[in-house]
Amino acid sequence: MNVSEITMADAKKGLDALKENIKKVIIGNEHTIDMVITAMIAGGHVLLEDTPGTGKTTLARIMATSIEGKFSRIQFTPDLLPADITGLNIYNKKEEAFTFVEGPIMTNILLADEINRATPRTQSALLEAMQERQVTVDGVSRRLDEPFMVIATQNPIETAGTFPLPEAQLDRFAMQLSMGFPTEEEETQMLSRFASSDPMDNCKPVLTTDDIVGMKELAKTVRVHPELVKYIVEITQATRKNPDILTGASPRAALSLQTIAKAHALTMGRDYVTPDDIKPIAADVLTHRILYYSATDHKSKREIISSILEKITVPSEDFA
């Protein structure tokens, strides 16, 4: 596709093809697949919190393969250093000059595996890259390739020796998602599909990184009705007034919810947002950005968000 000539119909067709290509490898998890694609079009990053072996790494790999992009994986450990992520300058004795050696962050899809096992200092090395789309080494800033997306994972069970992500970094993830365990039927299908070969080996790109960049620009043109802007504000304001919540969603969360909604509308082939682009994804966008009172830990965080949504009247205008 010519980046400047991508239409809504082109985007819908391309993103449907991307989804189908991913589903050749990932069985089930349709909502997670949809949301990861949506986050990429919105220019956001995703935090996948799940137990090992549920397909998080495979999802990141097939995403990169499907858009003909570069893929890097970093296994976060307590001894990982910021330079192991960003890269560093090495002195070349022959040329009597320093040469920059790129780190794994110079990629399109970066899998930050078990991000909460690294020290806060190393975790913070991702902050500039996630927000500014650049890395700075020895005072020199270098732009990252576009598209650039971080898919970070953390294991919610084995928390011994981990360093919980600070709120500032959590707020930079567009969504928190989970792969979950497959159903009996899905697991049976998975065993059959992987019985003789890895379907990843036969997957080919269906889009290019330039296509994704064009779609990201197109998503910015999606219209948001004033009543839906008001609806988003009411949702984030309600999180700040809820008695179960210690600290509500930040203004960045409201911006993220609007941006994700616009990208979701694009994936559906529309140039305007509807409530169906907001309400079903609100928990994915807001849950990890909110601090809860310890007394309410027995409640599902998503249940609290759902209860907030149920109390807010959904706009019913003609959004087209």
Image: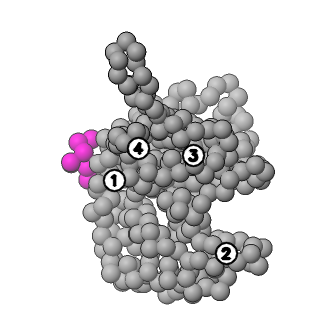
User: Between 168 and 47, which is closer to the camera in this rendering?
Assistant: 168
Label 3 packing within 10 angstroms: few (<14), some (14-19), many (20+): many
Circle nearer the N terminus (1, 4): 4
Name the N-terminal-most of marks 3 and 2.
Answer: 3
Q: Earlier in the sequence, mark 1 or mark 2?
A: 1
Q: Name the residue beneath numbered marker 1.
A: 216
Distance between mark 1 and mark 2 Cα atoms: 33 Å
Distance from the alpha carbon under mark 3 to that under mark 4: 13 Å
> Which residue bears the numbered disc 3?
122
Labels 1 & 2 near each other (Cβ < 8 A): no
Residue type marked 1 = Lys
Residue 122: % across, % down: 57, 46
- The label on residue 292 is 2
C-alpha gap between disc 2 and disc 4: 33 Å
Q: Nearer the viewer, mark 1 or mark 2?
A: 2
Picture layout, residue 218 above or below residue 312: above
- Tell me which segment is drawn in magenta: 1-7
Mark 4 highlights which residue? 135
Label 3 sits on what residue type?
Answer: Thr
Whole-percent x and y of residue 90? 44, 25
